[in-house]
Amino acid sequence: MKIAIMGAMPEEIAPILEKLGSYKTTKYADNEYYETTYKGVEIVVAYSKIGKVFSTLTASTMIQYFNCDKLLFSGVAGAINPSLKIGDLIVASKLSQHDLDITAFGHPMGFVPGGSVFVEADKSLIELSNKVALELGKTVQEGIIATGDQFVHDTVVKDNIVKHFKADALEMEGASVAVVCNALNIPFFILRAISDTADTDASFSFDEFMESSAIISAEFIMRMVDKIVD
Ligand code: SAH
């Protein structure tokens, strides 16, 4: 077993690296990958940089170059579902690219031929997360995550994403990672802690809460890792 743990930004993986202790750094494809053994299991950690392209590259690299056979993503997101508050955790049941638009040809938003509007996350990893949540006495909401190459800070954009995808949260990497893992048959798990509500105040809220929310997500991911390696 070799587990990939991904974030998009340095702050999202810093708490994970801290918990893992020492690691070897490998430079590959204009990025750094941190390799270690944790409780007898090999782990590769990396942050991709923001957005669908960089996250696609990193997920592919972790699977094809580093031979990881499971992928866990930890990070922050903007909330759409009003029940999600700052610091709350959301686990993706399925993910979609909200900015993939060839509707001019009669296709639904998020769809291109050969693909699908949604990619479903691995059910057994979600089940495992429910066990972890129960043990920690934490609430982790399962929901739809919409991904696109934009920081959403506008209720009109948000409403449009709800209209097309009924999404509960949005971010900029999850669906691209999902597409890669799905194509390569790698079970994946996308976890996000809320940093903002994707409206006019989003950038201020993000700056204030990104780091603390990233820690909440990272701590939960490490509990998942503990369960997986046990
Ligand atoms: N402040 C950063 C940019 C952050 S972009 C800088 O200046 O470099 C937002 C990041 O957090 C992305 O990785 C995305 O996945 C996530 N995210 C959090 N809230 C979001 C929102 N409202 N819209 C889109 N992505 C969001």
Image: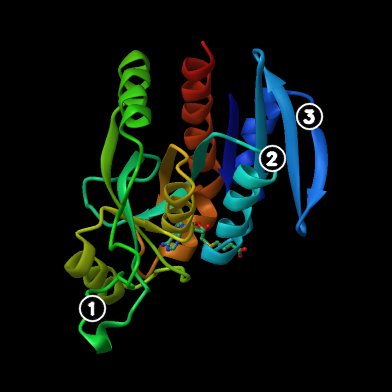
Mark 3 and mark 1 in contact? Answer it, CB < 8 Å: no
> Mark 1 is on which residue type?
His
State the CA–CA distance, disc 3 to disc 1.
Answer: 46 Å
Kindly identify which residue carries mark 2. 66
Q: Residue 73: image x %, image y %?
A: 50, 42
The disc label shown at residue 23, or none: 3
Q: Count neighbours of disc 1 (C-alpha within 10 A) and say few if under 14, some if 14 to 19, many if 20 or more.
A: few
Question: Which residue: 78% across, 52% down?
Answer: 28
Where on the picture, by quarter, is residue 87? top left
Label 3 vs 2, first from the N-terminus:
3
> Mark 3 is on which residue type?
Tyr
Q: Residue 71: image x %, image y %?
A: 52, 38
Q: Is residue 149 left or right of residue 102?
A: right
Q: Residue 114: image x %, image y %?
A: 35, 67
Closer to the camera: disc 3 or disc 2?
2
Label 3 vs 1, first from the N-terminus:
3
Question: Which residue: 55% across, 34% down?
Answer: 69
Label 1 vs 2, first from the N-terminus:
2
The disc label shown at residue 107, or none: 1
Mark 1 and mark 2 in contact? Answer it, CB < 8 Å: no
> Mark 2 is on which residue type?
Phe
The disc label shown at residue 128, or none: none
Residue 55 against residue 44 in the figure, above or below: below
State the CA–CA distance, disc 3 to disc 2.
Answer: 14 Å
Closer to the camera: disc 3 or disc 1?
1
Where on the picture, by quarter, is residue 107? bottom left
